Image (spheres, grey):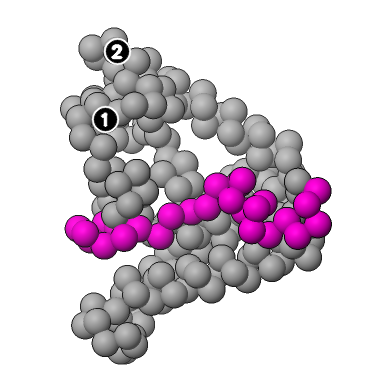
Amino acid sequence: MRTLLAAVVLLGSLTCVQAEKGENCEKGKKHHKRPSKAEMLEKFDKDGNGELSESEREVAHKAMKAKHREHMKKRFDKDGDGELNADEQAALDARMAEGRDRMKKMRESVDTDGDGTVSEDERAAAREAHKAKRAAVLEEFDADGDGRLNGDERKAAMASGKMPHRPGGHHKGHKRGRGDKTDKGADDAE
């Protein structure tokens, strides 16, 4: 069930990245922001034990899936009539299939024992590997030595193919909207 919840969170995060500004990729539209762990617990931890039980995870999964579905429907409703016509639905279906394929590849790369689930140890190992990649990118591409990637440094890192992407991070075709410098230092080398 954790894998399922993680999948929904990851799938939801594929829509865009400008959460800092509250905007979607299309200028001026509000972004579907992924809830924090604290927000998830506050909303779905009904027994108050600080963790989500299987049944609480299932409720959270269904709620997030419904919210994501509604967000995507609005995003792909290009004519603004509140419904998806055949072309809009086809575009949405293609985007969702792309997200499922990306998620499957990501899960397979993290599921090192091949049992079909991502354990806490596998998740922790993936996080550590990602941190190491970000640090290596920062080391290689931070030309001015300020501990951050500016726009030109980020472009060079991305062009090299060495820039790791995290779930929920920016991906092909989307802009961060943070300006030239970032405020996260090494964490921004993603």
- Cα–Cα gap, marks 2 and 1: 13 Å
Q: Which residue shows up at 45% across the image and 20% down it?
A: 135
Callout 2: SS: loop
Which class describes the residues within 10 Å of circle 2: few (<14), some (14-19), or many (20+)? few
Using the image as rendered, state which of residue 137 and residue 57 is in the foreground. 57
- The amino acid type found where label 1 is placed reads Arg
Q: Which residue shows up at 21% across the image and 83% down it?
A: 79
Residue 24 in picture, x, y percent from top left: 30, 58
- Report which residue position mark 1 lands on: 154
Residue 140 in view = no
Numbered mark located on residue 35 in the image: none
Residue 48 in picture, x, y percent from top left: 78, 52
Tell me which segment is drawn in magenta.
24-49
| Magenta segment main secondary structure | loop
- Report which residue position mark 2 lands on: 146
Callout 1: SS: helix
Using the image as rendered, state which of residue 173 and residue 148 is in the foreground. 148
Q: In this view, does 127 lie above or below 9?
A: above
Residue 172 in picture, x, y percent from top left: 31, 50
- The amino acid type found where label 2 is placed reads Asp
Q: Is residue 129 left or right of residue 180?
A: right
Q: In this view, does 148 lie above or below 116?
A: above
Q: Which residue shows up at 32% across the image and 21% down it?
A: 148
Q: Which picture quadrant has residue 89?
A: bottom left
